[in-house]
């Protein structure tokens, strides 16, 4: 049967006691995981990756369901970070880094926001702030949006690509 070295007492054990984690590479029971390894709460072991729906938290070398409030959740790389990588957008409302902004927000530079700067439109499909709407969308000026369909109470003027309020 497999046995593992319990670091604190130098005794051999067949399984790690509570609050200890199996370091599978070193075959030891440790009270915390070394840098580069993360406590897997499901397998009670130190691993280089985390289970599905968990994020690597380097501040505690743990796998967590939610990153600490001091860190950002990097949805692409599945880790907790102090700032978003430059190739991702940041959503300040949830402290999330991702490849696209969440629905209802628009990318303005590297940030997601609920509205766009004055003079720009929020493109609902692209989830981005744009200077002009694409030919496949309509300008809904009342809300400074580019939309694929005008809202109820408005009609789509195909020649101008503008949503006009119905009479």
Image (spheres, grey):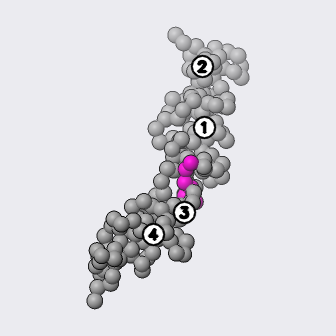
Q: Residue furthest top?
A: 1
Q: Are marks 1 and 2 in contact (CB under 8 Å)?
A: no
Q: Which residue is label 2 attached to?
A: 25
Image coordinates of residue 42 in percent, x first then y, are 50, 33
Image coordinates of residue 121 in percent, x first then y, are 47, 71
Please indicate, yes or no, whether residue 4 appears anywhere in the rendered image: yes
Secondary structure at badge 3 equals strand
Say whether disc 3 or disc 1 marks the residue closer to the N-terminus: 1
Residue bounds of the magenta highlight: 87-94
From mark 4 to mark 1, how far is it between C-alphas? 45 Å
Say whether disc 4 or disc 2 marks the residue closer to the N-terminus: 2
From mark 3 to mark 4, how far is it between C-alphas? 14 Å
Q: Which residue is label 1 attached to?
A: 62
Q: Main secondary structure of the magenta part?
A: loop
Image coordinates of residue 102 in percent, x first then y, are 46, 58
Say whether disc 1 or disc 2 marks the residue closer to the N-terminus: 2
Q: Residue at x 56, y 48 (%)?
A: 87
Q: Which residue is label 3 attached to?
A: 108
Q: Residue at x 43, y 65 (%)?
A: 123
Say whether disc 4 or disc 1 marks the residue closer to the N-terminus: 1
Q: Nearer the viewer, mark 3 or mark 1?
A: 3
The answer to whether 103 appears left or right of 84 in the picture is left
Q: Is residue 90 above or below residue 19?
A: below
User: On residue 132, which mark appears?
Assistant: 4
The answer to whether 134 appears left or right of 58 in the picture is left
From mark 4 to mark 2, how far is it between C-alphas? 56 Å
From mark 1 to mark 2, how far is it between C-alphas? 17 Å
């Amino acid at each position: 049967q497999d046995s593992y070295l319990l670091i604190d007492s130098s005794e051999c054990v067949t399984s790690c006691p509570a609050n200890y984690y199996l370091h599978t590479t070193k075959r030891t029971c440790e009270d915390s995981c070394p840098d580069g390894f993360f406590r897997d709460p499901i397998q009670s072991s130190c691993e280089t990756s985390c289970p599905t729906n968990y994020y690597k938290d380097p501040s505690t070398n743990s796998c967590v369901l939610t990153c600490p409030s001091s860190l950002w959740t990097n949805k692409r790389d599945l880790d907790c970070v102090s700032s978003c990588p430059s190739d991702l957008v940041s959503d300040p409302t949830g402290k999330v880094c991702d490849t696209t902004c969440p629905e209802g927000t628009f990318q303005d530079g590297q940030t997601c926001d609920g509205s766009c700067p004055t003079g720009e439109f929020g493109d609902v499909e692209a989830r981005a702030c744009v200077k002009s709407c694409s030919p496949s969308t309509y300008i809904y000026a009342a809300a400074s949006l580019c939309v694929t369909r005008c809202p109820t109470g408005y009609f789509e003027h195909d020649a101008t690509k503008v949503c006009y309020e119905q009479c």
